[in-house]
Image: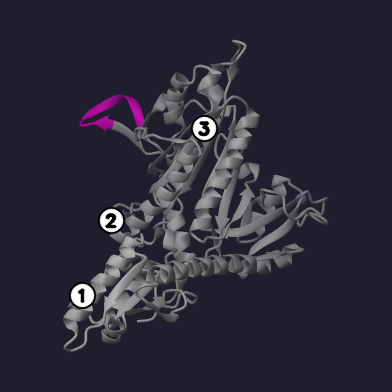
Amino acid sequence: MMMRKDEDFTGWFDRVILEAQIVDDRYPVKGFTVYMGWGYRIARAIARILEERLEEEGHQPVQFPVVIPEDAFMREAEHIEGFAASVFWITHAGDTRLDRRLLLRPTSETAIYPLFKLWIRSHADLPLRIHQTCNVYRYETKATRPLYRGREFLWNEAHTAHRDYEDAERQVRKGVEIYRYVYDRLGLSYLILRRPDFDKFAGADYSVAFDTWNPDGKVNQIGTVHQLGENFAKAFELEYEDEYGRRRLASTTCYGMGIGRVIAAVIAHHGDDHGLVLPPAVAPIQVIIIPIPFKGYEESVKRYAREVEAALKEGGIRVAVDDDDRLRPGEKYYKWEMYGVPLRAEVGPSEVNERTVTLVRRDTFERSKATLEELKERVEDLLERLYQNLKDRSWNRLEKEVVWAENLDELKAQIEERRIVKVNWCGDPHCAFRIKDEVAGEVRGTPWDGGEEAKGPCIICGGEARYVAIVARTF
Ligand SMILES: [Zn+2]
């Protein structure tokens, strides 16, 4: 049965995540989702790319406890205000009420900083950079949605401490660069926005966010990087001794990438009416070999399929043979298309005789033949082309989604069309709030690394525009 991604994105998405065994949302606690085999392998592959990059850039892997004591959580005023309503509390052990309530981490600053205070003694201990891949817990009151918004979600969070604000500022840039690297490997397009002050991370000086398009017109935030300045350092007394023996306050940053939302973006950007299309960097299987048995050739086809597999494996390609005799080749095509495996290799009697392989691209369904000798190079080339094609398509779509609006009526119309809209904005939060009241979208922020200059009057008050603001629907 065909699925129409463009006509019914939500129905398409729900079916794909279940049929391709990404996640199962039927766990009997609302907002909690089960990763299944294929989905978790993709999740780990994404996390691994990020972790390796972070470690190359000097971050140590750590694993902090999931519980945070109440007094640590209560130290930074803005942070409490931002997160208190969505915290899960542990109040009892058996029948005994705990003297000191514990909470499940909604994010780990308040778990990590009491230890940073012990680890940071002198300037020689700085910068300090750590990261962990873990689950965090937030009692979301907005509608939950598998991969996009859950009450438990898998993410990677990095936390850094520095000798001064300028060094933390360099780290913010580095964090943005690291995240770009990961999204680029996945062929995802994105906007990098500085969030307006009223929407920054609770306790941050400012926040930078990666937003990306979604087929339903609601932008998907796939990562954030925060300059925390001295806010948390003050609350947690993160002091160090500088070269001259003076006590000084550190500056900190943090950044987080929700793995589920990144998978959602991969599915939403690259998938088609046949199911998933996976970027080769995170495809658990990059080439699936389908033997096409023919009377009298059953054994030679199977043997040859194994030979093809060995040749690719030796070349470092993630490959598997589907020799399940219960399924016909057509059923196997359907299955592996749903799973998004980038390349299909068909081997039948003619391939056995010619010592060739028929390769079919998952993105374009283009077929080509390769000899066994040239197979590895041809596969690498096709994987690269497929990746480039996914990336180009994603960026082209983003370019089409982003439009200008000169006045409120235009903005309303464009948001109705589910576009991502640029407007002139004076920077006054009241004008941003008016936008939220008037249209079905909100100000997501201003382009982080400059870009277009504001020109003309603010779309709301008519005052001089200082920024180009991005307005979009959110889920
Ligand atoms: Zn204004």
Question: Outermost residue, top direction?
Answer: 245
Image quadrant where residue 338 sits: bottom left
Q: Which residue is mark 2?
A: 27
Q: Position of residue 237 (x, y in %)?
A: 52, 19
- Disc 3 Cβ-to-ligand 1 distance below 8 Å: no
Residue position marked by numbered label 1 in the rendering: 303
Q: Is mark 1 within 8 Å of ligand 1?
A: no
Label 2, label 3: how many angstroms apart (C-alpha)?
35 Å
- Split into 4 quadrants, where in the image is the N terminus? bottom left
Magenta-highlighted residues: 92-102
Q: CA distance from mark 2 to mark 1?
A: 42 Å
Count of marks placed on residues: 3
Q: Residue furthest bottom?
A: 295
Q: Which residue is more in the foreground, 207 or 283?
A: 283
**SS under mark 1:** helix
The kind of residue on which mark 3 rests is Thr
State which tag comes first along the sequence, 2 or 3: 2
Label 3's element? strand
Say which amino acid is labelled 1: Arg
Is residue 187 visible to us here?
A: yes
Q: Quadrant of residue 91?
A: top left
The residue singled out by tag 3 in the image is: 160
Q: Is residue 52 above or below residue 349?
A: above
Residue that appears at 43% across and 66% down: 380
- Examine the rendered structure and indicate whether residue 81 appears above or below residue 239: below
Which residue is at a point 43% across and 48% down the rendered structure image?
Answer: 140
**From the Cβ of disc 2, is ligand 1 less than 8 Å away?**
no
| Vertical placement of residue 406 versus 45, above or below | below
The crowd level at tag 1 (other Cα within 10 Å; few <14, some 14-19, many 20+) is: some
Indicate which disc, 2 or 1, sits on the residue closer to the N terminus. 2
